[in-house]
Image: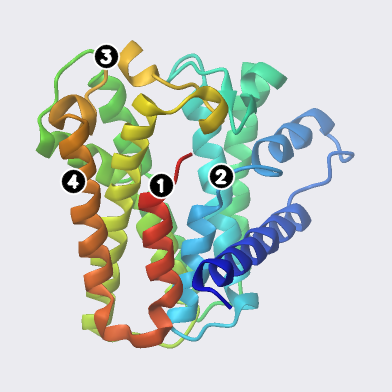
Amino acid sequence: MHPDVAWAVWSGERARRVESVVDGFLPPATEPPQRLHEAMRYAVLGGGKRVRALLAYAAGELTSADPAVVDRAAAAVELIHAYSLIHDDLPCMDDDVLRRGKPTCHIAFGEATALLAGDALQSCAFEALAAAPLRDRGQAVLLLAQAVGSRGMAGGQEIDLAAAGQSLDLAELEHMHALKTSALIRAAVRLGADCGRPMSADENDALHRYASAIGLAFQVVDDVLDVEGTAQSLGKTAGKDAVQRKSTYVTLMGLAAARERIETLHVAARTTLTGFGTGARRLLELADWIVARTH
């Protein structure tokens, strides 16, 4: 089978797998309070690239983990990601109306219900992880909590809000995205890997460097696509960084240098995996896909 076809088959199967896991874990829309449960399901199911879940499954393959053990970890990071998107889109944050090709949660359900849906999805993520068949559930919950809190996603979002209309330098921008974007990507990789055999300190370090590089690459690609993409191709509002006068890799470096930065991070991510052999196949393919994506 051609590598591209094999990748498409694997990624499609894993995306459907985590969708089914999340679908089965979330309360049904018919259960009271119906509107809240409907909003939660609306925000998570039937859309999205599932990058974080794919990273968890791919890292699990690195340590020979059973996909059935990775399922809850993959679902947890997708639930956290969905919660963060609901809150990011609220009028008090980025004030966006389009996400994954459909109206944002607060447009569809109102701000109050959207806020509660995000809160509930975050709680669901920790519930899923706490009940997962992991070697050390406590460590897994701690890892995810640190990725989500003030030293992770929430902190990165606060820095982003405070920087609106101001000019950040490149080091400040990378620090912000290391928290806002990369923290959950790093957590997804580590959670997936921890579902399999124990890793050495050197292996843990290499995997951390991979996740850090590909997490930043993901954000630089996002910044380029915000300039070059359309709402139709992206499934979300294009050009909003310029409207909000945000510092991005494109505004600081220019398009050509931003693309060079993507390739540098791509090479760095692939290089960190050279000692893992064939078990790193899916992580390598994910690195290739992340930098080449168009949405």
Residue farthest toward the right in the current orientation of the protein: 30
Q: CA distance from mark 1 to mark 4?
A: 29 Å
Going from N to C along the chain, the mark reached first, 2 or 3, is 2
Q: Which residue is denoted by mark 1 in the rendering?
A: 148
- Secondary structure of the residue carrying numbered label 4: helix
Nearer-N-terminus badge (3/4): 3
What amino acid type should be assigned to the residue bearing mark 3?
Arg
Residue 83, visible in the rendered structure: yes
Seen from this angle, which residue lies furthest front? 2
69 lies above or below 54 = below
Q: Which label was assigned to residue 122?
A: 2
Q: Nearer the viewer, mark 3 or mark 1?
A: 3
Q: How is the image coloured?
A: rainbow
Q: On the image, numbered disc 3 is attached to which residue?
A: 245
Horizontal and vertical percent position of residue 33: 82, 33
| Distance CA(mark 3)–CA(mark 4) | 23 Å
Callout 2 touching callout 3 (CB < 8 Å): no
Near mark 3 (Cα within 10 A), the count class, few <14, some 14-19 or many ≥20, is some
Q: Residue at (37%, 42%) from the top-left corner?
A: 153
Q: Quadrant of residue 53?
A: bottom right
**Helix, strand or loop at mark 2:** helix
Residue at 52% across / 66% down in the picture? 4
Residue type pointed to by label 2:
Gln
Circle 4 is placed at which residue position? 260
Q: Earlier in the sequence, mark 2 or mark 1?
A: 2
Q: Amino acid at mark 4?
A: Glu
Q: Nearer the viewer, residue 239 or 60?
A: 239
